[in-house]
Image (cartoon, rainbow, N blue to C red):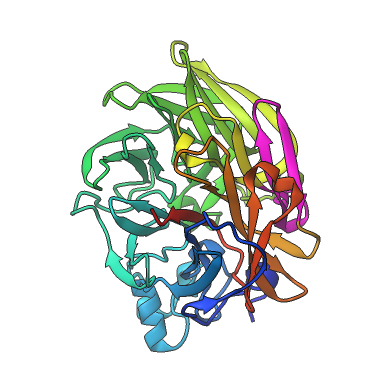
Amino acid sequence: MNDSPYLCRGFEPLRTEYSDLELSIEGEIPRELNGTYYRIGPSPQFPPRGNYNPLQGDGMMHAFNLRDGRVLYRNRWVRTEQWKLEHEAGRALFGTSGIPADSDPSVAGMRTNGVANTNLVWHGGKMLALEEGHAPIEIDPESLETIGAWNFANRLPRNMTAHPKIDPRTGEMIFFANFPSGRINGDVELYFANASGKITRSQIIHGPFAALIHDFAITEDFIVVFFCPVTVSIKRAIAGGPPIAWEPDYGTQVAVLRRDCEDEVRWFSGAASMAWHSMNAFDQGDRIVVDVCPQQTAVFPRADGSANDARRTAQFLARWTFNWGRPGAFYAERLSESICEYPRIDERYLSRPYRYGFVASMGGPGTQDIFHRGIGRFDHERREMKVYAAGSNCAVAEPVFAAQTLDALEGEGYVLTNIFDEARGASDLAIFEAEKVEQGPIARAHLEHRVPVGFHGIWRPRS
């Protein structure tokens, strides 16, 4: 029996697919909120083999279709090669732990197209389900049926990040592949895709060590890639050590390069930290400003297998500042004392100066609570975090911003998230006024089942 905490309560897998359920509404959904809120996360279709790692659980998409004050819900597993093989077998075949012995001998050494469980992006007229170890999976945005693997007309040889960045003015999408050749080293490959989804160029960065890189940042002029000291080593794993480990002696090394230059990379260094997600970044004269939610210590063990101080894994919003003309040490400043993660913004301001950010707060690493219990709105101008507390029995998902209108002012709109109510054993779609997040939801659409607490989501307006 697998007793992982990531298989119960708010994380318990959903093993039923629903089509166009009309949800009961509490409050009133704004009529101008017309579009679809999508979420994705792990929901293994069968009890996992061996130790369960949610990062490798089968991806499931959820779609909340909002129109004229009504909400229709549907969900579908992403039909990856792995999912189809297990579905046909009627049981789990692939281990999620990374330990080969956890997989069934019938699939030993088999390379599939991944689990597509981490994030979603709408770009070039395509909905793509993402996870950083493999290429994307294309999804029909209406039915959620799986169309198949997508490799940008054979321009993407292997994998891509789950956190691409889309320039809101040009429509260009910039993304990267960690370990692009399949060899575990410090290489990262950057890709540039135009608004129609065609890759126009790529560039290799040779990093100082084999880092587990999850996210990065862009400004109007620069790209910023974080090499945090969480390292990946097959050699270490073969010797019986952890395949992913915290090695703080490396410090945090950051590569900065111009978006329009294919040659020069300038390097900056700082204290050891692990930044899973960036909130935003922008240019400030000769300086590059990047807002992140770093940990002082990662959740992974050290290279010798010893544990880290769990209290130092708490995440706080921080600002990293780089002086392009003076490579070397970068300046790090904590912006808030509220523990937070899953930072999001009004994405019309991605890569540009901005004022507001939205986060999941009140819980997570370093708090002895694996769930986040609140939604926060940070005002950079006032350096102020205002938080809505959902309650000790409620788990919130990443907040997603939806503008009130296409030409609304920054932060003028709504925040959408899922809230799992442990007392009901079911989830709601919760809608907040973005300027008054701390006052709680103005509307809830009630499900009669859970949406497993997962990773990321997007809003796609109907227009």
Say left or right for 334 vs 133.
right
Q: Determine whether, in the image, residue 251 is placed left or right of residue 82.
A: right
Residue at 33% from the left image edge and 71% from the top image edge: 146
Work out whether residue 423 or residue 189 is closer to the camera in this orientation and state it: 423
Task: Inspect the magenta stretch and tell me whether residue 379 lies in it.
Answer: yes
207 lies left or right of 278: left
Q: Name the residue: 59% across, 32% down.
A: 249
Taking depth in this image into account, of 139 and 180 the one nearest to the observer is: 139
Residue 436 screen position, x and y as percent: 70, 44
Numbered-mark total: 0
Residue 129: say if magenta. no
Q: Depth check: give the residue in front, 368 or 22.
A: 22
Residue 276 percent coordinates (x, y): 55, 44
Q: Is residue 350 visible?
A: yes
From this viewpoint, which residue is outermost toward the right? 392
Q: Quadrant of the N terminus?
A: bottom right
Residue located at (78% from left, 74% from top): 423
Residue 296 appears in the picture as rendered: no
Farthest-out residue, top: 325
Determine the main secondary structure of the stretch shown in magenta: strand
User: Magenta segment, which residues?
Assistant: 360-389
The answer to which of 423 and 277 lies nearer the viewer is 423
**Residue 428 rendering spot, x and y as whole percentages:** 65, 67
Residue 150 occupies which quadrant of the picture? bottom left
Q: Position of residue 246 (x, y in %)?
A: 59, 43
Give above or below for 359 relative to 12: above
Residue furthest out toward the left: 153
